[in-house]
Image (cartoon, coloured by chain):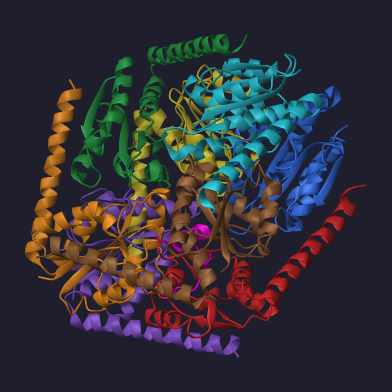
Chain colours: A orange, B purple, C green, D yellow, E cyan, F blue, G red, H brown
Amino acid sequence: MKKVGIVMGSDSDLPIVEKAIFTLREYDVPCEVHVLSAHRTPQQAKEFSENARANGFGAIIAAAGKAAHLAGAIAANTTLPVIGLPIKSSTLDGIDALLSTVQMPSGIPVATVAIDGAVNAALLSIQIIAVEDKELAEKLDSSRTEMSKKIIAKDKEISAKYNN
Amino acid sequence: MKKVGIVMGSDSDLPIVEKAIFTLREYDVPCEVHVLSAHRTPQQAKEFSENARANGFGAIIAAAGKAAHLAGAIAANTTLPVIGLPIKSSTLDGIDALLSTVQMPSGIPVATVAIDGAVNAALLSIQIIAVEDKELAEKLDSSRTEMSKKIIAKDKEISAKYNN
Amino acid sequence: MKKVGIVMGSDSDLPIVEKAIFTLREYDVPCEVHVLSAHRTPQQAKEFSENARANGFGAIIAAAGKAAHLAGAIAANTTLPVIGLPIKSSTLDGIDALLSTVQMPSGIPVATVAIDGAVNAALLSIQIIAVEDKELAEKLDSSRTEMSKKIIAKDKEISAKYNN
Amino acid sequence: MKKVGIVMGSDSDLPIVEKAIFTLREYDVPCEVHVLSAHRTPQQAKEFSENARANGFGAIIAAAGKAAHLAGAIAANTTLPVIGLPIKSSTLDGIDALLSTVQMPSGIPVATVAIDGAVNAALLSIQIIAVEDKELAEKLDSSRTEMSKKIIAKDKEISAKYNN
Amino acid sequence: MKKVGIVMGSDSDLPIVEKAIFTLREYDVPCEVHVLSAHRTPQQAKEFSENARANGFGAIIAAAGKAAHLAGAIAANTTLPVIGLPIKSSTLDGIDALLSTVQMPSGIPVATVAIDGAVNAALLSIQIIAVEDKELAEKLDSSRTEMSKKIIAKDKEISAKYNN
Amino acid sequence: MKKVGIVMGSDSDLPIVEKAIFTLREYDVPCEVHVLSAHRTPQQAKEFSENARANGFGAIIAAAGKAAHLAGAIAANTTLPVIGLPIKSSTLDGIDALLSTVQMPSGIPVATVAIDGAVNAALLSIQIIAVEDKELAEKLDSSRTEMSKKIIAKDKEISAKYNN
Amino acid sequence: MKKVGIVMGSDSDLPIVEKAIFTLREYDVPCEVHVLSAHRTPQQAKEFSENARANGFGAIIAAAGKAAHLAGAIAANTTLPVIGLPIKSSTLDGIDALLSTVQMPSGIPVATVAIDGAVNAALLSIQIIAVEDKELAEKLDSSRTEMSKKIIAKDKEISAKYNN
Amino acid sequence: MKKVGIVMGSDSDLPIVEKAIFTLREYDVPCEVHVLSAHRTPQQAKEFSENARANGFGAIIAAAGKAAHLAGAIAANTTLPVIGLPIKSSTLDGIDALLSTVQMPSGIPVATVAIDGAVNAALLSIQIIAVEDKELAEKLDSSRTEMSKKIIAKDKEISAKYNN
């Protein structure tokens, strides 16, 4: 199975990024985690992304805050799908990271998820790998069913509490 | 080869969406185009997305403006990768469509591209299909090389004009 | 008397939504509370809204955060008045929920209230039912009178404290 | 049948507001149109709204731009449902009118629709009147069916054009 | 001397508004404080403002949050200078109150100060009264001098600490 | 009668600023117009404002776009009421000028009006002068009456056109 | 004299960027112009910036729109001062480019100027070079004097027209 | 070596500004710290900036919040490079300070860094001085190398923790 790369611009992003790691583990999708900075270790970021396809990656999640260039910098050096995960930092509530990640110029797409949306970043990478992996697709489908069941259970609980 | 679905909330989105169609044609990736509205033809949207994997789709691009729910409505009914293309409409410069598309709740990811970023929506769908399609991946890589060459040519032209 | 439906996208919205429930109880307007997700239980959301008029509802309040599609998803399946209650979540201060709720396309209105404005969502649903219910309209009017009196009392208290 | 009041802060809002008038006519719902300004004719606005229920109105649409106080000023003097229609003006793309209309304090709801969303303002008022008017509710339902058919026809047309 | 009216939409605005009261007291400018709501006690607000000039007021400060209509509602009923003080509330960081206060239509100005800028609201009212009151103008000038001296003292303290 | 100073940061602001000049002329309030830049002629701006009270001014209107510092720079050198008129320029729709004008620090108020709100800037300056000028106050009041009459006439015209 | 590098992400930025080129020519500061894309020619961007100091550059102006990563990508590979020039593109009025340029992480500064502020980008680069170049500093000072004189002349012209 | 001036609008900015001071000390670049207010001590601000070049400064960092005019006020009186450091205050998350600092009119540039980006403000000033100071440039380069090493070490640590 193809691996998912998870890279973050700073280890301060880890509390959010961990949710992506744990989600991938739930699905038994192999992943590789790195701290790579578009601005502070550009050479490492470049090498990682240039070799990502050859190294067995199927998608790369890039998490960064503020002027979040990491996803774009990764995407500039690979034609694998790159998933941008904008991280909220101390000012502007993450809108800076969102716009810096999503407003990519024509030619270099970044698949952007919600601010701090680490679980969805992971699920998106799994969906990408599942396009050609029936078993994984079925796991995704049964997770959806589980998720529905939980909401339905919550609905029952709350209906019981308030409706009578 | 897996097909790419392209759905739009209204035919008024077509001038932007056409760029996605033409990009897919350049890469000889089969696509199927539909007008489907999360709010006005929810049943059709549901059926399309529920059956999309079985019908041979590998990714779905969903374009919509304003309170752009289409991508989310598609994503709610399939575990295929869904690409959200926010369309700028007459007010708010597209920020409403961007936030309505990207800020998805945990469990249902939408891979969002830039406002009016139809070419990138198409490229992202191609990248997803190319994960398991070497030939297509090579096409993407050579397009990148072409793109670089054009920029380099532009650089020469403009350098020649202004530097002397 | 027609009932008011109160649906929320997630039980985490309950602390806000409860204010709507309690307001309806104050007015003895019957209500039914559900957890329904546009994205995680779309089928349940569809069924609830398709049958809402037949089931005796007069208005539906839909509360959701982030890319708040719930009100729109309900409104897509009923022509009852649907009241959108945008919920503030961990990023963007609720502006994402507000725009996702209010910027609906032509044909499918959502009556949107303030971010976290649960009391007003309830009052609006009561006003709708009161259009053809004189007694309820009078209750609304006397509540207004009460409200005025409270403000006038506050004015007296504060005038006395600061003006002399 | 209850009438719908349509009031606008300035006759410059008429090009947008006319769409509401025409929508109400399509449904044969009687309406009464006024220019009333929260700031320039506050007395007239007050009298109109204080007497609106007695004068046979079932809902009031209030359209205004910039610091759009009209809907709130109407709502302060009636417990009928008041629908706020924020109008885009020369600066800020209508976000000022949207926030001034929707962010109402607890106790005085305004049912806000999209910026320049005049058709939806009218439809919402019709939905409110249709709560106790079966025939009108059926008209709304068949309009929805019509609308769906148009989208489905568009879908056929565009599918035929691009898919082959 | 003319009085300054200080009105607030809700007594929850008092912690901010008190700074305006205390500033006026420092300058011995008489003021009168009221809780008046554009939406909840519109009649009281109207009467206060209609009679304000006759009652010896020279300026009115109106503080309100969210869809802050109070300053506009006061300004609609008097031609005295009305100072709008936007109050930050639980969502949107006060930008809703700011836009609702400042974006007034032509004909009805509101002199808006910073979000939560109660001291400046008071100083502005004092400046207005000081236009024809030499002694008060001199007090304002000497306060400025005091303020400068404090900054200069701070500068010395901090220079001493960091420069050596 | 006290004069009103009207200063603008650039002569490109003149098309907006002229409306303020013409409004003052309608009320026969003397004004003096200057081009003064906080950044390009700071010395002239300083001298104008330092001497403004002695030179018979009662209020100063300062119009500027982008990082609109002019009103603040004037206010820093006088304790006369300074009215800030934010001008919309080629980007950001005037929100930069609005925030730069209104968000003044404690101690130095600027009475801010709407973006491009030149008429209101003038009216506010007239209101300030009218605090101690009964005749001018009466002129303001009769203008209000005129304004109301115009709206009422518009109301009649539009009522006649649409209601029958 | 040190050269100024001017790089732009796309030749579509040229109409704005040309103003920087012409400003540098007015001051006889040598410049070198390039089209370099952070995403489409990352290698060229890297090489240019890595060698910039050795190649005699004293500052680099980087112009880009949307998710404007170019200035950051240049700054990641040189410790020369890098000036970020955010370019307004078809959506969001340039706020995306501004935030993507200015919100840089600690360690890699970008000196950001106004959206489309090409003249100021050039002036800033000249100021940087003038720190150790007395003659150039004097040119900057006399330009300021010229600029003041123009404003003073405008002031005279407009004073004469409106004041009498 | 040229000195760096660090000025702040209020001593409440000191917790952020201190990071700039400490960064300059790390590089042994002499600095001088002042509290200077564009609005409260305009004369002191003017004198400081007018004499800054003669007094041996090579760059000036100006920190301010809200309607942050300080950097502009300094830049108006010197042709030295002025670095604007927008400070987040109690409302609007610093966007007011950012826009007030960066959106300078043509002719008077301010080199703006991120909101609360004090370290980068200092580094930018060091980069400016290092343009003609080889030794300092080398220090900057080796700091970059250090920074890279730290990230690489973090990468190892985190890789080891999550990849196995």
State the residue lying farthest toward the left.
Answer: A135
In x, y percent, where is residue D1? 45, 25
User: Image quadrant of residue A67?
Assistant: bottom left
Q: Residue at x 41, y 21 (%)?
A: C131
Q: Residue at x 36, y 43 (%)?
A: C97
Depth check: E88 or E40 in front?
E88
In x, y percent, where is residue E158? 54, 45
- H73 relative position to B113: left or right: right
Q: Is residue C120 visible?
A: yes
Magenta span covers which residues?
G78-105
Depth check: F4 or D156 in front?
F4
Can you say which quadrant of the picture contains the C terminus of chain C?
A: top right
- Does the magenta segment cover residue F68? no
- E5 relative position to F19: left or right: left
Q: Residue at x 51, y 71 (%)?
A: G81
Depth check: C10 or D84 in front?
C10
In x, y percent, where is residue E54? 75, 15
Depth check: B156 or H155 in front?
H155
- Does the magenta segment cover residue G102? yes
Q: Is residue A78 above or below residue E52?
A: below
- F63 relative position to D133: left or right: right
Q: Is residue H65 visible?
A: no
Image mark count: 0
Q: Residue at x 20, y 77 (%)?
A: A53
In x, y percent, where is residue F37? 74, 54
Q: Is residue C73 above or below residue H121?
A: above
- E157 relative position to F144: left or right: left
User: Image quadrant of residue C63?
Assistant: top left
